[in-house]
Amino acid sequence: MSNSSSISHFLLLALADTRQLQLLHFCLLLAISLAALLGNGLIISAVACGHHLHTPMFFFLLNLALSDLGSICSTVPKAMHNSLWDTRTISYAGCAAQLFFFVFFISAEFYLLTIMCYDRYVSICKPLHYGTLLGSRSCAHMAAAAWASAFLNALMLTANTFSLPLCHGNALGQFFCEIPKIVKLSCSKSHLRELGLIVVSACFSLCCFVFTVFSYVQIFRAVLRIPSEQGQHKAFSTCLPHLAGLSLFISTALFAHLKPSSISSPSLDLALSVLYSVVPPALNPLIYSLRNQELKAAVWTLMTGCFRKQ
């Protein structure tokens, strides 16, 4: 038995048992992280450098790319290090920092996806008021509110999680530091306070989810009233990338945390945690650029310009 004051490090879940599989997982994580860095980096550079992309939709997409980079950089490097050097340890302070940054960037991503839904709603349902409702100052305020809310959420959850007395060992059963895994190590009834904060955070997330569903109901009703089939297709094409990215993020996260305990297993938990924490940041650049001709053209111009300079 031990308590939190005597814990100097935690043991993370090993991605594989054999050395060959560990190296394979290292290579896969390296490929995914490089894809995420390249894709999100190109989006950030293209939007920042392309003056014709200085619109609310691309401004929020730039912020989303920043949150994707942050979320994947908060978990993957340590997992790659552990796989490469055949270790499982992470320091107490390192675990707290990893948890804070992961919650911060994941929360920011969800709030930004909600704001992007509002952008699509105003664009399709209230096009005449688009410039008024989504001016540059309004967009800056909404983005700042998303990042500030994410920071406060991460700060409260991290501070309360690591204030719990821990006496059930230091093995987390996850490849990165996650709140539910740390709470399981608690031996005090004070963990109810942590669960209360999680419930409050979940209720706020639920409100964002309900707002998103309501917005898309209004969007689809407005699109179906468009008389021309070409107009409907154009309106749907602006919503599909956001809807796909949001669905990927929410579905994997919900299933990972709300799945029945009867089907739970270490390998399944590991696969699901990778799906919601690693895969979306790598796929989002592809999802948002696949059907957006303006963004593809800007990225192509940026890449060809860099090659010409070389």
Image (spheres, rainbow, N blue to C red):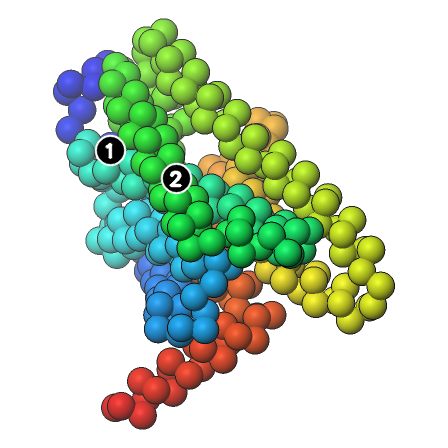
Residue at point 43%, 44% (across, down): 142
Q: Nearer the viewer, residue 10 or 257?
A: 257
Residue at point 55%, 35% (across, down): 208
Q: Which residue is mark 2?
A: 145
Residue 187 % position (x, y): 32, 11
- The quarter of the rendered structure image containing the C terminus is bottom left
Instruction: Give the quarter of the image for residue 161.
Output: top left
Residue 238 against residue 160 in the figure, above or below: below
Residue 4 against residue 134 in the figure, above or below: above
- The mark that comes first in sequence, 2 or 1, is 1
Q: Which residue is mark 1?
A: 96
Q: Amino acid at mark 1?
A: Ala
Q: Amino acid at mark 2?
A: Ala
Residue 32 against residue 309 in the figure, above or below: above
**The furthest residue to the right:** 227
**The furthest residue to the top:** 189
Residue 301 % position (x, y): 42, 83
**Element class at badge 1:** helix
Residue at point 73%, 44% (across, down): 217
- The quarter of the rendered structure image containing the N terminus is top left
**Element class at badge 2:** helix
- Near mark 1 (Cα within 10 A), the count class, few <14, some 14-19 or many ≥20, is some
